[in-house]
Image (cartoon, helix red, strand yellow):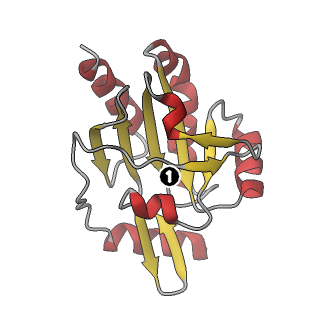
């Protein structure tokens, strides 16, 4: 119940305005995934990256969004793109979440919140921090090609896939 209340508070207070812009160099990162393997943005130069931030494992919206990315992963891979989900949850939480929903992409643990902050996707409510539900499409040169803020987890993946196809034309 507390997760639902905090998630609702986050949705209401998020203003959806970012200083990062299309064409900016995407901030580099190195974060562990659910298998404790380090993943770095700069190892994907030459490829497209879909980097989505989400508030918390095992909440309804976050589960919907993750499962929708899982279900679309073959189409995303066919477009020569990789997907990374990012939240402040622990590696252990990500492992359980990934195993429970059979996620076929890396979800990254940003336990410090530093990467979320560098992508202007961190909300800090006194003692509680969470990642905002934002997504970035990063082009093969490492530049931000598309930004989404405050997305609808039910329809977001279809929008991202459509835009990825348009960006690659």
Please, which residue is most extreme toward the bottom here? 126
Residue at point 50%, 43% (across, down): 65
Side of 86 relative to 167 (left or right): right
Residue 35: x and y, percent? 77, 43
Side of 60 relative to 47 (left or right): right
Side of 77 relative to 154 (left or right): right
Side of 141 relative to 5 (left or right): left
Q: For the image shown, how many numbered marks are present on the structure?
A: 1
In the image, 117 versus 4, the foreground residue is 117
Q: Within the image, what quadrant is residue 153 found in? A: top left
Residue 132: x and y, percent? 42, 61
Which quadrant is the N terminus positioned in? bottom right
Is residue 79 placed above or below 151 in the rendered structure?
above
Q: Which residue is mark 1?
A: 61
Residue at point 45%, 45% (across, down): 52
In the image, 15 versus 61, the foreground residue is 15
Residue at point 51%, 18% (across, down): 77
């Amino acid at each position: 119940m507390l997760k639902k209340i905090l998630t609702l508070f986050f949705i209401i207070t998020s203003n959806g305005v970012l200083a990062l812009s299309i064409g900016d160099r995407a901030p580099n990162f190195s974060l562990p995934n659910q298998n404790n393997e380090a993943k770095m943005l700069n190892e994907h130069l030459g490829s497209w990256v879909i980097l989505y931030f989400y508030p918390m494992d095992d909440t309804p919206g976050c589960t919907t969004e993750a499962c929708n990315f899982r279900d679309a992963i073959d189409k995303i891979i066919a477009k020569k793109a990789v997907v990374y989900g990012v939240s402040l949850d622990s590696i252990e939480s990500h492992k359980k979440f990934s195993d429970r929903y059979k996620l076929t992409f890396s979800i990254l643990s940003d336990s410090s919140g530093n990467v979320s902050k560098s992508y202007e996707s961190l909300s800090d409510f006194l003692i509680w921090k969470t990642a905002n539900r934002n997504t970035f499409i990063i082009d093969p040169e490492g530049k931000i090609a598309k930004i989404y803020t405050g997305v609808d987890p039910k329809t977001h993946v279809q929008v991202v896939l459509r835009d990825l196809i348009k960006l690659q034309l």
